[in-house]
Amino acid sequence: MGDLILAIDQGTTGSTALVLDANGHARGRANVEFPQHFPKPGWVEHEPEEIWASVRTAVERALAAGAAKTNDIGAIGITNQRETTVVWERASGRPIHRAIVWQDRRTAERCAALKAEGQEARVRAKTGLVLDPYFSGTKIAWLLDHVEGARARAERGELAFGTIETFLVHRLTGGAAHVTDVTNASRTLLLDLDRLAWDEGMCGLLGVPAAMLPRVVGCAEVVGTTRGLGWLPDGIPIAGLAGDQQSALFGQTCFAKGDVKCTYGTGAFVLMNVGAHPVASKSGLLATAAWQLRSGEAATYALEGSAFIAGAAVQWLRDGLGLITAAPEIEPLARSVPDAGGVVFVPALVGLGAPYWDPDARGLLTGLTRGTTKAHVARATLEAIANEVTDLIEAMSADAGAAVARLRVDGGASANGLLLELQAALAGVRVERPRDVETTARGAAMLAALGVGLVKGLEQLRPWSAPDASFEPQASLETEPGGREAARSAWKRAVARARG
């Protein structure tokens, strides 16, 4: 085997493959989109076989782009959309149903019923999470209760559950490995966050048979090797696993307590490294595992805030309203006006995530007049994304007892300079962006490099992701009527209206 690292970033709308050399330099990259399925309002599904096909195609294209041979790969790292849930037959490997995506809201009634029973405090104390259809546990139970015979089969041990990294490792190893890393496991509502082990009480509460759960492993250790694929040789170690947001935190080298990053993807996700012990949030955030490099070692924890719609709001302007024909058009369009003209957009298109956790909130455009143009709506959309993230940063500062001074950013939408100017101004923080904004995939590669010993410690990884541009808080919003305070007040009033 060689010394190249293959990172697979299996995201919500597409699969990315990134090939890096042993110094962290990108050799090849490719992204392959796959279909989204919306069988009912509020329901979002993926076909696992379409995901698998997109991964293979992305890997083949990335290797070709980097003029790399499959035998040059020395390790594989995987990062993934986290709470998306797959259940498959152990014997055949065939999924019993489409994957239920993290955005899916079909289990909202079940979550509400558990809250009404007074279970929320128990769940938060044990898992660090809240009772919301966002997480995997109620999705698993829905599949078992709505696919004929599934619950009985699961109890007999015939079915396996996994988030997407579990499904991919199972496929890549020819069915030999059924594992999940601590970061993905911590998003299921089933993991004891202190012990980093499955909790019988949570399994019983949600109706999930323990027999279908994968083994919990570390984020930077060999968990299996490729076998029987045809398009990759046998024997490549799979040595890095982490959910996408934790992978981005690692990829941004947020190794110190207090470091904060935001990934702007389909949603916006802010994580703060809080050190060796979980921090219970009083501000609507989540406690989660940041990473545990190897099983049995000390773990690092994070506070997390998630806004469900960020880049997806731009996609909605493109695909739903037809205001733009391509996502990059939004920045020059938004810059063509000095401010949003009083327009405020609350992108609660699938409810609101942290810190509100309101699945019934709905999107809202307010402040429209005869003078409103699509440019004002475009600017209001960028302000909405920045306001959502500012809500999360303010909640994080309250929980941590210290103001956030610096925000490291990544993800596709972070290429938008106006968005980052608005973010710095609204949040009052310095914003730093690396040269390679696809930090999620890079984090998976960094974990894999550690996992197989290509690098010996965290400090050797810092050069892999250095800041390349920065945005200062005083440099923006100078033309906004009333400045930051007025913009934040208008946003909070609009959120209250969106929540009814």
Image (spheres, rainbow, N blue to C red):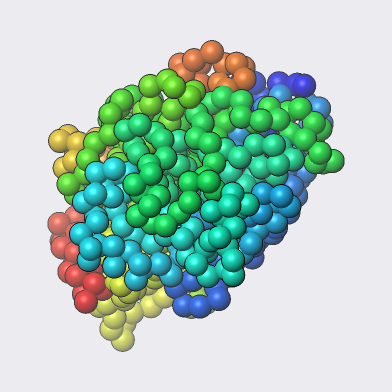
Tell me if 64 is positioned left or right of 457 in this view: right
The image quadrant of residue 37 is bottom right
Q: Position of residue 159 (x, y in %)?
A: 61, 53
Report the residue at 31% width, 25% height from top: 276
- Which quadrant of the rendered structure holds the N terminus? top right
Tell me if 280 is positioned left or right of 86 in this view: left
Q: Residue furthest top?
A: 456
Report the residue at 66% width, 42% height from top: 170
**In the image, is residue 158 above or below residue 398?**
below
Q: Residue furthest right?
A: 230
Report the residue at 31% width, 86% height from top: 370
Report the residue at 22% width, 66% height from top: 116
Q: Position of residue 492 (x, y in %)?
A: 19, 64
Q: Position of residue 271 (x, y in %)?
A: 35, 41
Q: Count every numbered label the image shows and give the total.
A: 0
**In the image, is residue 40 above or below residue 388?**
below
Viewer-proximal residue among 250 and 345:
250
Viewer-proximal residue among 285 and 309:
285
Residue 459 in view: yes
- Which quadrant of the rendered structure holds the C terminus? bottom left
Tell me if 414 is positioned left or right of 340 in this view: right
Residue 310 in view: no
The image quadrant of residue 366 is bottom left
Q: Position of residue 387 (x, y in %)?
A: 28, 57
**In the image, is residue 119 above or below residue 43?**
above
Viewer-proximal residue among 279 and 223:
223
Tell me if 438 is positioned left or right of 225 in this view: left
Q: Residue furthest bottom?
A: 370
